[in-house]
Amino acid sequence: MRNAMGEPQTIVVFGGTSEIALAIVRRLVTPRTSQVVLACRDVDGAERYRETLNAQLAPAAVSLVSYEARSYASHPELVAEIADRVGDLDLVIFAAGVLGRAEQLAVDPVAAAELFEVNTVGGVSTCLAVANRFREQGHGQLVVLSSVAGERVRRANFVYGASKAGLDAFAQGLGDALEGTGASVLIVRPGFVTTRMTEGMEPAPLATDPDSVAEAVAAALSGRKRTIWVPGPLRWLFSVLRHLPGPIWRRLPLK
Amino acid sequence: MERRSLSGWGRTPVSVADVIDADAVDLDRLLAGFGPRGAIARGCGRAYGDAAMNAGGTVLRLADQELVLDDATGLLRVGAGVTIDAILRESVQRGWFIPVSPGTRYVTIGGAIAANVHGKNHHRDGSFGRWVKSITMVLADGSTITVDPDSDPDLWWATIGGMGLTGVVTSAVVEMIPIETSRCLVDTVRANDLDELMAEMERGDERYRYSVAWIDLVARGARLGRGVLTSGDFARREQLEDTDPLRYDPGHLASVPAGMPNLLNRAGIKVFNEAYFRSAPRRRTDEVQPIARFFHPLDAVGNWNRLYGHRGFIQYQFVVPDEQHQVIRRAIERIVMAGRASFLAVLKRFGEADPAMLGFPMPGWTLTLDVPAVPAVLADLVVDLDEMVLEAGGRVYLAKDAVATPEMIRATYPHLERFVAVRDRVDPDRVWNSDLSRRLEL
């Protein structure tokens, strides 16, 4: 159960090696958090830094479970298993996602579909399984890592952008569908975040970092917001960009 | 049945449950319909935290039931859903008062038993449970039983103060206390610092049946812990010149509307505390006060909990044993340092503890404070206060709690294992659950 300060006792991350998600966990974990579950594809790889995390997140116990976003048939069972082990899921972060290489994705049908399987299809099945559990337990907060890339899809990385647009629209609808169940969904739309995933790329204007995203998420959760942009001004920038006429939009030098 | 968002009196995070208005006779039938999240009874919803919430499960509200007072013996047979307010409206004119009253009369008898409430007379009269003669309750297996302290002491002392986790109390027999008038004679002392206040309170233990102190948690330095102590007892017939000595009219000043912003901000609290302190006389004796003013001052303002705005507040109440009285000073220093003044801070002396397995009181000092639920400030404050309380061998009160950890409760409630053993016996499948029981692994 979350306590009166909104502090979760249990935190579960899907896409448990995501730097942004781990920054959020570090920000939200308190001495009253007992369990942190990181569901990730590469459990062996994650095992290497589990000790560091254990030390950082103590007294919460960190555990790793194997999670493959594309094996959507396994998701309901996985969510049930986690709940059996740690009890109520107070806070769940969906952070599984791949960026891919935009040039390849633009022309490779199979690679593009695979990216959708992780970013969108996996998100749908995972979040729905979590939402079902939330309905049963009468409470729960779900944080979905979306992206401004999905707000108006740019030609430079339209496959990735479209996958996030799908996830984002789904998460909005899910949040509305959960109204009155005690559960809630927070959609996070960061701009360019400097992480391993974006290493070697040239930062876009209004770039941010995982800790800033984490700070914004913490504020949004206690303020009961439903959608946030990080940094905040992206909201206003994209509300303009979204309405630009096509000929102008296509000519903008957006990478 | 209705699916509803519920919160405690502190209005902090909500959870959703199916709320059922139940009649005692329906209970065994209803039992079959509870899902895996089980059920908990809810009275007036005055527990500050999550004691009467059950996310994803069922919350039972018992209909108003019988209220039969025997004028010859003072024994009150009363349904668990009946409030102390309703009881007083019947009993005071007939010369009987509730033996233990918490700071509000809007609690049900079921709630008073479940939280084993205490009042201004704890140092003399103990908690509510001491005055309950028998309890009729519905157990998880659907059976209805009547228990008293001798018939099944384990179940009795697990149910008194058991936060509703042993079964649903449907009615009880309570021993009322006789009063000659409905007025109290109140002595007020204004103390300029904490030492003076605590010394005054220790001296007053013997003399007064009822006593409680308000503390100004804004004052710093030499004035740290200054406060106003009010003590008294019911006036006897010959002490009043009144043709209707048992008149009872609790009245109601105003209600706080919904959607109120947080008025109890730092400036507001500072002004209030200064004004309250200065308006108290240095020393006054034998002031005549009606019951409502002396026992239930906050009830004069309906929904006062809305004053904290939409984020709500927590009430942190702890007790430390007599020999650890210096912890009260350290705690007040820590709270003043946090700069989040408490609107309501109350200091009270406790007398002997009851054998209740989850009993809160112990001989010593109990401090209660409201703090707005602003996580950034509250989180560190709670960690520090918990540590002080733990070290001093004290504990926090479950009926108020919304922030403790299972470890804290295990370390400070020595009879928790016996309590769990009783639950294993009468509710092995854990039909009775609450957000509190889940959060604290009770």
Image: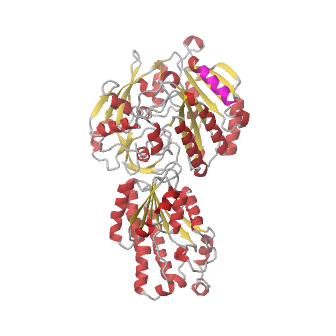
Whether residue B355 is visible, yes or no, is yes
Position of residue A1 relative to residue A233, above or below, is above
Which residues fall within the magenta stretch?
B193-204
Quarter of the image that includes the C terminus of chain A: bottom right
Residue, x 37% and y 60% (percent of image)?
A132
Q: Is residue B441 located in the magenta-colored stretch of the structure?
A: no
Answer with the quarter of the image where residue B275 lies. Answer: top right
Whether residue A173 is visible, yes or no, is no
Answer with the quarter of the image where residue A215 lies. Answer: bottom right
Count of labels in the image: 0
Residue farthest bottom in this picture: A107
Residue, x 41% and y 70% (percent of image)?
A41
Q: How is the image coloured?
A: secondary structure
Task: Give coordinates of residue B98: x percent, y percent.
Answer: 47, 24
Task: Give coordinates of residue B246: x percent, y percent.
Answer: 52, 19
Task: Give coordinates of residue A159: x percent, y percent.
Answer: 48, 81
* A166 horizontally vs B39: left or right: right
Position of residue B3 relative to residue B123, above or below, is below
Task: Give coordinates of residue A133: x percent, y percent.
Answer: 38, 58
Answer with the quarter of the image where residue B367 lies. Answer: top right
Q: Main secondary structure of the magenta part?
A: helix
Residue farthest top in this picture: B238
Residue, x 48% and y 79% (percent of image)?
A162
